Amino acid sequence: MSSADRTRAPRKSPDARRAEIAHAARDLAHEHGLTALTLRAVAARIGVAPGLVAHYEPSMDALVARTFRAVVAAELDEVGALVAARPDPPARLAALLRTLLDSARSDVTVVWVEAWALGRRNEPLAHAVREEMDAWQSLIEGVVADGASSGAFRVADPAVTAWQVLGMIDGLNAQALVRWGDAGERGSLIEHAVEGMLGLERGTLEAASAA
């Protein structure tokens, strides 16, 4: 086919083209994970030649890192707003645990799991992963610290507790991707573990979630 017969991509401003590429990359990550982000895949999604994507995104490592940030930061904002709307620390923590263990969020779990693996050889991505994990720990720490200051929780170090809770959430969600264990028990398993860490009676978080 001659170049004259090819359909040319419509001209767009540099900002519009970069936004289009970023949006396509986010869609691919949600649908297929970070490993799906290649020049060809992004170009095919928006109907342009791979060389055009490379012109605007000369580093795929950087594009993968920014896409990871966009996906997980959006979830953090969403969950943060949901948690803030709850009336007290037990209800906030219960809502956070139930929301993050929801199987409907498996697309974001895939992005996280692949980011941990790909970050070994992609330093911009590794940096983004560390910062986003810090942000999640900070959200959980805030809930735990509020509960400790109000007397609802008995915990010596909210930061350490938040780190442990985040690790349990990540582990259970990663296991769920390969359907290991009983998906229906994941919520109660982590709630019981967290109740023990916070000096709560068993069933406190389940009751708070139901309320």
Image: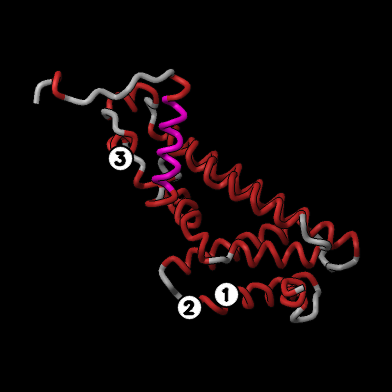
Which residue is drawn at the image coordinates 40% and 20% (left, top)? 12
Label 1: how many Cα within 10 Å (few below 14, some 14–19, many 20+): some
Q: Is residue 153 left or right of residue 17?
A: right
Magenta-colored span: 17-29
Return the residue at label 1: 186
Q: Which residue is mark 2?
A: 181
Disc 3 marks which amino acid? Ala
- Element at label 1: helix
Percent across and percent down for residue 135 are 66, 46
Helix, strand or loop under label 3: helix
Residue under numbered circle 3: 41
Is most of the magenta stretch helix, strand or loop?
A: helix
Classify 128 as above or below 92.
Answer: above
Q: CA distance from mark 1 to mark 2?
A: 8 Å
Q: Which residue is found at the position 76% from the left and 54% from the top? A: 84
Q: CA distance from mark 3 to mark 1?
A: 35 Å
Which marked residue is nearer to the observer: mark 2 or mark 3?
3
Q: Amino acid at mark 1?
A: Arg
Q: What label sits on residue 22 in the rendered view?
A: none
Give the distance between the C-alpha atoms of the residues marked 2 and 3, in whole angstroms. Answer: 34 Å
Locate residue 176, reporting x and y percent.
47, 69
Asked if the residues shown at circle 1 and circle 2 are in contact, with their CB atoms under 8 angstroms apart, the answer is: yes
Q: Is residue 25 magenta?
A: yes
| Mark nearer the viewer, 3 or 1 | 3
Who's the residue at 77% across and 56% down the image?
Answer: 85
